[in-house]
Amino acid sequence: MRSVDDIEVAGRRVLLRSDLNVPLDLKGSGAITDDLRIRASLPVIRKLADRGARVVILAHLGRPKGDDFATRAAGGPSLAPVASRLGELLGKPVAFATDLVGPSAVATVEGLDDGGVALLENVRFEPAETAQDDSRRSRLAAELATFGDVYVGDGFGAVHRKHASVYDLPLLLPHAAGDLVVAEVAVLRRLTQSPARPYVVVLGGSKVSDKLGVIGNLLDLADRVLIGGGMGYTFLAALGYEVGHSLLEADQIEPVRGVLAEAKRRGVEIVLPTDIVAATHFAPDAQSVVVPADAIPADREGMDMGPDTRALFAAKLIDARTVFWNGPVGVFEFPAFAAGTRAIAEAITKVDGLTVVGGGDSAAAVRSFGLAEDAFGHISTGGGASLEYLEGKTLPGLVALES
Ligand code: ADP
Ligand code: MG
């Protein structure tokens, strides 16, 4: 993979695919609630602008709905507030085009001086961006390609998507990987190629079906897998335990039994919760009790791991030399049920070795606890992309950059 240091950019138009998909307060002011991804995108933008490139940024935001550009643009979300925040963080104005391949984009790109930065509107306002049909995507990519002399792929959070701006566009232009993509891939490589041992993986989050693929592949790599959160109840159910109203994917019980058997065969230790904070219902102020993991009352719902499990998981992390953590181990958004996730985060900050946090909600949890980001080796900007990499899948955005 070429990096931006290997390409000539001075005076050239650089089409830069970034990941600026930040969470917005959509029920309230629409404000950006967390700008990690914007900050993580700054280094390459600064570097390209400092070297005299005309930087034209492509990015997506949210999941716009509708059959055409006009409908999607009317429904939003627009990248306009992201352009303002980017300008504040860069310390210079960012020109904003209100379309992708229309008159505003043409004028905005033509108006750029060397060292100037522009952002085009939400690339997903063009339905062809995410089309399954290769020729529809290629047509959009060809139109976008007229705005650039070179392409830089830096949107790590989107590299697992076969989308026009991620996959088809780099095939049409000289291309290089941006600094964020280079850094993320380097860390993931360290997690898959001779990691220091013991290598401990912590998995949580809501859906076991999302994560069974990665568990399968991690059995080849990890020494220990600690499983909690909503997905943990399907594991407890696979052991034959009652899980009450807790999250459960009944159709995953058999596959989970397969994973447990495979782990045993390979000598990988799987650690499950031994006690659970069980609430009357899913609410921030629900009344709760701590119960053994094999005795969750039928009318209760598991919301967090109990104190014994917090201590157990911390003990299983203490000697680790490599840690990968994805997925909160409880409903951390409700303070009453955040203690388990906090205990995991704190235990990981004490590990002497490479520690990686992947996943939007996991990273948000770390920040909500006020833990210093540099207490972790790496906080990935791409949850889905990191998981698919660790699953051993090929990521279309990386394939295109490597070509
Ligand atoms: P990430 O974004 O880090 O990959 P996920 O999206 O997989 O994480 O999962 C995050 C969600 O899982 C959080 O919203 C959290 O509330 C939820 N969750 C964790 N534990 C439970 C539980 N016991 N019951 C219901 N939801 C849970
Ligand atoms: Mg998530």
Image (cartoon, rainbow, N blue to C red):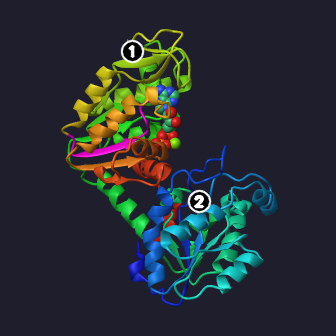
Q: Amino acid at mark 2?
A: Lys
Side of 346 where 22 appears, left or right = right
Seen as rendered, the residue at the extreme bottom is 11
Q: Determine whether the residue tagged by mark 2 lies in a helix, strand or loop.
A: loop
Q: Which mark is residue 290?
A: 1
Q: Quadrant of the N terminus?
A: bottom left
Q: Quadrant of residue 366?
A: top left
Residue 326 belongs to magenta span: yes
- Observer-side mark, 1 or 2, equals 1
Disc 2 residue crowd, few under 14, some 14–19, many 20+, Cα 10 Å? many
Side of 33 where 142 appears, left or right = right
Q: Can you identify the residue that label 2 sits on?
A: 162
Q: Position of residue 386 (x, y in %)?
A: 43, 51
Q: In the image shown, does 148 or 265 lie closer to the viewer?
A: 148
**How many numbered circles does the render carry?**
2
Q: Amino acid at mark 1?
A: Val
Q: In the image shown, does 199 or 80 lie closer to the viewer?
A: 80
Residue 359 belongs to magenta span: no
Report the span colored magenta: 320-330
Considering only vertical position in the picture, is 185 above or below 214? below
Side of 343 where 147 appears, left or right = right
